[in-house]
Amino acid sequence: MKVLVVDDSKIARMGVIKSIKEVYPNAQLLQAINGLEAVELYEKENPDVVFLDLTMPVMDGYEALGKIMEINKEAQVIVITADIQNEAKLRVLVAGAKNMYPKPINGEIMAKIFKQDILL
Ligand SMILES: [Mg+2]
């Protein structure tokens, strides 16, 4: 399984990666630090799952989500953000995200995400 982790904060990326490794120790992990990198890596690597931050420089998560869904309408994107407003959640769900979770994520939440939101 190939997973793309997108966040401008290294600490946040490391937190998501640690949680993924608790559930899937052998997952192949890719990282991007903004939406533009994420879209480029998505296109090149076709990951099974994307964990996507919303607030990022260069290209934010909303725009990246739109572009990823244009590349693959079956893309499995989970938004992980500090912006937990219902408006943000509705917006990303309408745009095609599988679900949205507040930061920080731990192994228990990650296990739940893979069980209920992701098809492998
Ligand atoms: Mg951010």
Image (cartoon, rainbow, N blue to C red):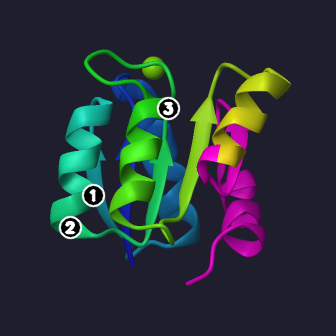
Toward the bottom, the furthest residue is: 120
Question: How far apart are the two marked residues, 2 and 3, measured between alpha carbons?
Answer: 20 Å
| Residue named by callout 3 | 62
Q: Amino acid at mark 3?
A: Tyr
Mark 2 or mark 3: whose residue is earlier in sequence: 2
Q: Residue at x 34, y 68 (%)?
A: 47
- Vertical side of 20 occupied by 17: above or below: above
Q: Are marks 2 and 1 in contact (CB under 8 Å)?
A: yes
Quarter the N terminus occupies: bottom left
Quarter holding ligand 1: top left
Foreground tag (3 vs 1): 3
Q: Amino acid at mark 1?
A: Tyr
Toward the front, the furthest residue is: 70
Q: Residues within 10 Å of mark 2 (few under 14, many from 20)?
A: few
Can you tell which mark lies on residue 94?
none
Q: Is residue 101 magenta?
A: yes
Q: Residue at x 64, y 40 (%)?
A: 92
Task: Say which quarter of the image contains residue 63.
Answer: top left
| Residue named by callout 2 | 45
Can you tell which mark lies on residue 42?
1
Q: Position of residue 42 (x, y in %)?
A: 27, 58
Q: Residues within 10 Å of mark 1 (few under 14, many from 20)?
A: many
The span shown in magenta is 95-120
Tag 3 secondary structure: helix
